[in-house]
Image (tube, helix red, strand yellow):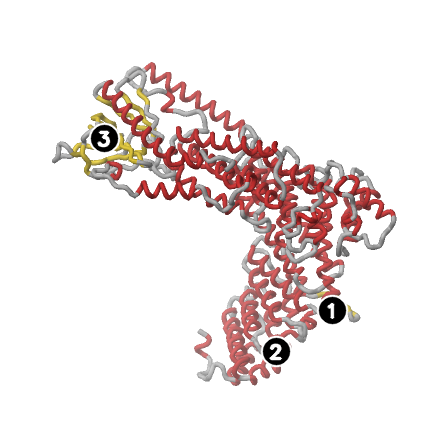
């Protein structure tokens, strides 16, 4: 509105710019009455300055002459409660963002105007001012360079005492809004990348450097929150997984931010950040693991420690942190005589021995780790030397590894733990260290999992021996009875395959026997699935799981997400009280059902089928559970198939399921005349061998139908056909159910009733499991059909035909899969 009253001249002319500035200078107070006028003036100034920066240098000369930035600061101060701060910051951000002339940028940052805007007292309580303010700070940080950052520093006696842009931004470092956190971190990285000598001196002062320690402290709190989620008492597993994914994403964001800082080529900054990471995060976690504790003094569990250390190594590639962790891990599992060798070198004070392993041993000799305050001493002592670590002492090269004892401590005791999550987590840490491209070659040789071509030359008999023991431990996991959960078996198989690749000697007979036993058990469990309701899907699941397991087993340590450790810990730590609640609920439901059933028996006018068809106490039944059990059996069997070449020899790229796929395609390509197996809803089919019966529909009474079971190769269906109104020998298909899983039973009290269970054709269990031709007519109670026949003889005939067709279908599937199941371990 106010713009329409301005003189009709060129809006971007120098004359008009002077006019606008003079109008702004006349403003003495800003309130709700003139707020819009002031905003129009500020917006016009920003537009004209942005235009002048590209087309008319005289405009910016006028901008400097009139000290327009000072006017912005004045308007900000007299703004009061008019709410002008947010749009003013936005206009300033737009102007600074779009100004490209270096002379103009230098002027904007000089004279303290920007610092005045930054340091102004804002009322951040409520409202949306914070996003505008942080956006302004980030915009300023994007324009600073090594020549201009000094203009924003407050100096006293040639020493930087404050950097308002940095100080004010850090106040929002832990803001709940993620976008604000991202903006603050981008700002800090911009400053770190262009900081000069004076700024770096300021950043490393105790006051400014406290930001890095608070960053690690917040990171530790997130780790504690991960523990709290795992041990939660109310959440279900799926809720836990959702919360764990959210919290671990936040931890990863912190890791990548710290990595970005370490990538800045400034030694003082790198040392400061690394000290905080090692001192406050890595060493407390290593002390937890190396001293065989389930948790440390801060309450952080060993599983979470292992997850964080693995993730840290995967993210912080190109840094020396892998050698800090690798040294501690290496030292923790060295046999006693090697430790004695290291101690003798330490006592001789050889100057070349300055690796972290020796430092850690020195610390252990100086203090009792069980004594109060010992951890702080150890952290400080090891930290003193850890950042100077360049290579391992030659004392480890000359140690008599081949004569060492078979006694292991530290992280190796975790590997042989009965806690499978702890075992797999410790292995994950070792593999992640060993696979790191930044691992020192001497450490790689000592650990023994190195991917170096000459690894066999570097690994002594003792190292090969401990690999053999780990292999044996993993094989025991595979062969455990009762079988462990499939996730544990899958990850154990991954570790086993990795070790077998690097093990250049045959397994012992006992280990081979363990695998053979485990393989036979997996075959037996898969055979059992042919008698259950999803046997017709076994060939398809075999093919899909072959590809899935192959991808999972071939995953590298650096790309393998250690999140599975937290998942396993959540499974092994179910919410306390959940089992009691489940039992209480089951007993309550059982009591209600028995009461209802008793009332129905007393009222003889109500006829009920057997109780087992109405109510199922066990939670481990039903199509969904049966499907998952079948998939798990297939997965475990496929894991054994893919591990077999690495144990008994053979081509690891050979796919025994290729022939299964070819034969299946050849069989499925056949077509038969009048093939009822191809019938679908609404199809017209010959009634032929159909057996007449009745079925009751809710709200629609009973209907006369024909039952036609049909099996053709891998396909099997039970057709419910209603007689065609115009063709007496034909009918229309009104419902279809898969043969597999029908499990027909004749009711004991009503010999003309045939009860059949239902499952979907595909493993997508929905509420509308069974479809009907008539959308206005629903089938009887979902999950079962009760078919009423004219006589007991007809009922038995239908029962026999369904069993026979199911047997034919099952026989075809068994013959199709038999070559794979009967494959010999030795060829």
The residue indicated by pointer 3 is: 700
Coordinates of residue 440 in the picture (x, y in percent)? 70, 54
Residue at 63% x, 60% y: name it.
260
**Could you classify mark 3 by the number of other residues whose Cα lies within 10 Å: few (under 14), some (14-19), or many (20 or more)?**
few
Element marked by disc 3: loop
Q: Are marks 3 and 2 in contact (CB under 8 Å)?
A: no
Which of the numbered marks, if any, corresponds to residue 197? 1
Q: From mark 3 to mark 2, how far is it between C-alphas? A: 84 Å
Residue at 56% x, 85% y: name it.
58
| Nearer to me, 128 or 38 | 128
Q: Quadrant of residue 141?
A: bottom right
Coordinates of residue 250 in the picture (x, y in percent)? 58, 51
Q: Mark 3 or mark 2: which comes first in sequence?
A: 2
Which of the numbered marks, if any, corresponds to residue 102? 2
Which of the numbered marks, if any, corresponds to residue 715? none
Q: Quadrant of residue 412?
A: top right
The residue lying furthest to the right in this view is 348
Asked if one can make out residue 662 in the rendered structure from this viewpoint, the answer is: yes
């Amino acid at each position: 509105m106010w713009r329409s009253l301005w003189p009709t001249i060129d809006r971007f002319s120098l004359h008009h710019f002077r006019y606008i500035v003079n109008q702004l200078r006349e403003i003495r107070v800003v309130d709700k009455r003139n707020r819009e006028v002031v905003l129009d003036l500020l917006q016009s100034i920003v537009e004209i300055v942005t235009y002048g920066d590209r087309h008319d240098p005289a405009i910016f000369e006028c901008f400097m002459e009139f000290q327009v930035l000072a006017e912005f600061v004045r308007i900000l101060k007299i703004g009061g409660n008019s709410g002008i701060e947010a749009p003013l910051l936005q206009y300033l951000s737009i102007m600074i963002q779009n100004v490209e002339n270096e002379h103009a940028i230098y002027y904007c940052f000089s004279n303290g105007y920007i610092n005045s805007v930054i340091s102004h007292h804002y009322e951040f309580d409520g409202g949306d001012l914070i996003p505008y303010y942080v956006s302004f700070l980030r915009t300023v940080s994007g324009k600073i360079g090594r020549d201009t950052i000094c203009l924003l520093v407050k100096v006293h006696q040639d020493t930087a005492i404050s950097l308002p842009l940095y100080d004010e931004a850090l106040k929002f470092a832990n803001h709940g809004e993620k976008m604000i956190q991202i903006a603050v971190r981008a700002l800090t990285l911009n400053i770190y990348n262009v900081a000069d000598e004076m700024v770096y001196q300021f950043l490393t002062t105790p006051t400014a450097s406290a930001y890095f320690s608070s960053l690690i402290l917040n990171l530790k709190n997130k780790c504690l929150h991960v523990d709290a989620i795992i041990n939660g008492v109310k959440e279900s597993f799926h809720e836990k997984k959702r919360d764990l994914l959210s919290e671990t994403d936040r931890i990863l964001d912190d890791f990548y931010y710290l990595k970005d800082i370490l990538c800045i080529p400034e030694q003082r900054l790198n040392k400061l950040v690394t000290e905080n990471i090692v001192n406050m995060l890595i060493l407390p976690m290593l002390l937890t693991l190396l001293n065989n504790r389930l948790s440390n003094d801060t309450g952080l569990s060993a599983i979470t420690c292992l997850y964080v250390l693995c993730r840290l190594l995967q993210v912080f590639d190109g840094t020396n942190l892998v050698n800090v962790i690798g040294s501690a891990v290496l030292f923790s599992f060295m046999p006693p005589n090697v430790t004695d060798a290291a101690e003798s070198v330490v006592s001789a004070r050889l100057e070349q021995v300055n690796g972290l392993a020796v430092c850690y041993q020195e610390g252990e000799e100086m203090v009792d780790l069980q004594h109060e305050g010992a951890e702080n001493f150890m952290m400080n002592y090891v930290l003193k030397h850890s950042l100077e670590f360049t290579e391992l002492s030659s004392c480890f090269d000359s140690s008599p590894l081949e004569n060492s004892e078979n006694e292991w401590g530290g992280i190796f005791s975790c590997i042989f733990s009965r806690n499978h999550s702890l075992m797999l987590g410790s292995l994950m840490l070792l593999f992640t260290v060993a696979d790191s491209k930044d691992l020192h070659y001497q450490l790689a040789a000592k650990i023994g999992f190195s991917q170096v071509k000459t690894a066999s030359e570097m690994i002594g008999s003792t190292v090969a021996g401990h690999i053999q023991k780990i292999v044996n431990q993993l094989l025991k996991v595979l062969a455990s009875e009762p079988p462990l959960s499939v996730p544990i078996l899958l990850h154990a198989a991954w570790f086993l395959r990795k070790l077998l690749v690097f093990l250049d000697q045959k397994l012992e007979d006992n280990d081979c026997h363990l695998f053979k036993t485990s393989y036979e058990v997996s075959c037996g469990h898969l055979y059992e699935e042919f008698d259950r309701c999803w046997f017709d899907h076994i060939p398809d699941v075999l093919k899909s799981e072959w590809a899935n397991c192959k991808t999972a087993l071939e995953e590298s340590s650096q790309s393998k997400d250690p999140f599975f450790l937290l998942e396993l810990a959540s499974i092994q730590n179910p919410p306390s009280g959940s089992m009691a609640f489940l039992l209480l609920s089951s007993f309550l439901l059982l009591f209600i059902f028995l009461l209802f059933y008793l009332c129905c028996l007393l009222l003889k006018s109500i006829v009920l089928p057997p109780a087992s068809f109405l109510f199922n106490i066990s939670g481990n039944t039903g199509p969904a559970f049966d499907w998952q059990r079948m998939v798990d059996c297939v997965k475990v069997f496929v894991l054994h198939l893919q591990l077999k070449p690495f144990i008994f020899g053979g081509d690891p790229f050979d796919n025994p399921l290729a022939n299964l796929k070819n034969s299946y395609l050849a069989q499925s390509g056949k077509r038969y005349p009048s093939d009822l197996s191809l019938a679908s809803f609404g199809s017209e089919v010959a009634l032929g061998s159909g057996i007449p019966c009745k079925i009751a529909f809710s709200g629609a009474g009973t209907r006369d139908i024909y039952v036609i079971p049909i099996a053709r190769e891998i396909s099997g269906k039970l057709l419910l056909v209603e007689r065609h109104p115009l063709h007496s020998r034909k009918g229309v298909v009104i419902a279809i159910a898969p043969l597999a899983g029908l499990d027909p039973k004749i009711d004991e009290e009503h010999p003309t009733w045939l009860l059949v269970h239902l499952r979907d054709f595909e493993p997508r269990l929905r509420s509308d499991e069974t479809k009907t031709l008539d959308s206005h007519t629903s089938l009887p109670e979902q999950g079962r059909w009760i078919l009423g026949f004219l006589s007991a003889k007809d009922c038995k005939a239908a029962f026999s035909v369904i069993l026979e067709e199911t047997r034919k279908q099952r026989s075809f599937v068994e013959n199709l899969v038999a070559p794979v199941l009967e494959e010999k371990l030795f060829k």
